[in-house]
Structure formats: C-alpha cells, structure tokens
C-alpha cells in the first residue's frame, strides 16, 4: 500500500515541476502603450511669440507679421486642455511677448478658436500683476 502512495506523490511532484517550468517560459505581457502626446504638456508663453503673425492676420493686420494659419502656433497648445491653453495664451498676451498691447479677450478668443480650442465658459484672463 505504501508503493501506490509514493508513486502518486512522485507523479504529483513531477506534474507540479513541469507546470512551474512551463509557466516560467511564458513571456510577461507587453507594457501598455504610452498615451499619444505631442510632447508639449506644459506652457511656455515665450514660445508663443510665433503666434504674432497668426494674430496679425486674425486681427486685421494690427500686429507686425505675415499672418498665418497657426502652423507654428497651434502645435504649442496641442498637449494642453482648453483651460491650460487659455491660461498660457493669457500669460503670453499679458507678458506682451508679441510686443503690442491688444484687446486681450478678443485676441485670446480668436487665437484659441483658430487652433480648434475653446475659451472655457466664464474664463477671463487674470489681471496683470
């Protein structure tokens, strides 16, 4: 009677060893893909200087520059949500990086709309410090 118990135990040990070896051979699942990003998830108002030409065209040539379709400007806002994009444009307009005093709410609205963004409801640019 002892022999059948030992053989059952031996088969069980061999089966467990085979299963653990098989499990060790399975590669781990691949890591999840990184979210698509333009690499621009932060605001740098100084970089928005390139938006001067775009604003010039939108505001009827009031600014020096050649106009434009937002090709250089809009990607700078690409990784930002609308609220952050609006705050970034406000900071650029308030810092006067474009070199001209503007109607800030109008310039903000035109620039964000051209880039396919919306000014969040109730948003106003904070007053200059």
Image (cartoon, grey):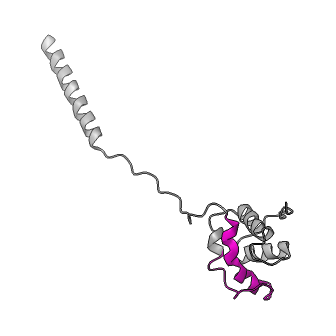
Q: Residue at x 62, y 78 (%)?
A: 72
Residue 127, by quadrant, is: bottom right
- State the residue lying farthest toward the left: 3
User: For the image shown, how many numbered marks are present on the structure?
Assistant: 0
Left-right relation of 78 to 98: left
Q: Quadrant of the C terminus?
A: bottom right
Left-right relation of 45 to 36: right
Is residue 83 visible in the rendered image? The answer is: yes
Residue 67, by quadrant, is: bottom right
Using the image as rendered, state which of residue 114 and residue 72 is in the foreground. 72
Residue 108, by quadrant, is: bottom right
Above or below for 67 versus 78 = below
Is residue 1 visible in the rendered image? The answer is: no
Q: Residue at x 53, y 63 (%)?
A: 36
Q: Which residues are magenta?
A: 44-73
Q: Give the image location of residue 112, x and y in percent.
A: 73, 73
Above or below for 31 versus 23 = below
């Amino acid at each position: 009677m002892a022999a059948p118990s030992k053989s059952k135990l031996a088969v069980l040990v061999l089966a467990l060893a085979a299963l653990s070896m098989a499990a060790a051979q399975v590669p781990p699942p691949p890591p999840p893909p990184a979210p698509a990003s333009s690499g621009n998830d932060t605001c740098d108002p100084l970089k928005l200087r390139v938006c001067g030409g775009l604003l010039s065209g939108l505001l009827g040539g009031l600014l020096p520059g050649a106009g434009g379709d937002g090709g250089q400007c809009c990607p700078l806002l690409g990784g930002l949500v609308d609220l952050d994009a609006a705050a970034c444009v406000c900071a650029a307009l308030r810092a006067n990086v474009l070199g001209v005093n503007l109607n800030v709410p109008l310039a903000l609205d035109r620039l964000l709309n051209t880039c396919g963004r919306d000014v969040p409801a109730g948003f106003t640019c904070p007053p200059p410090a």
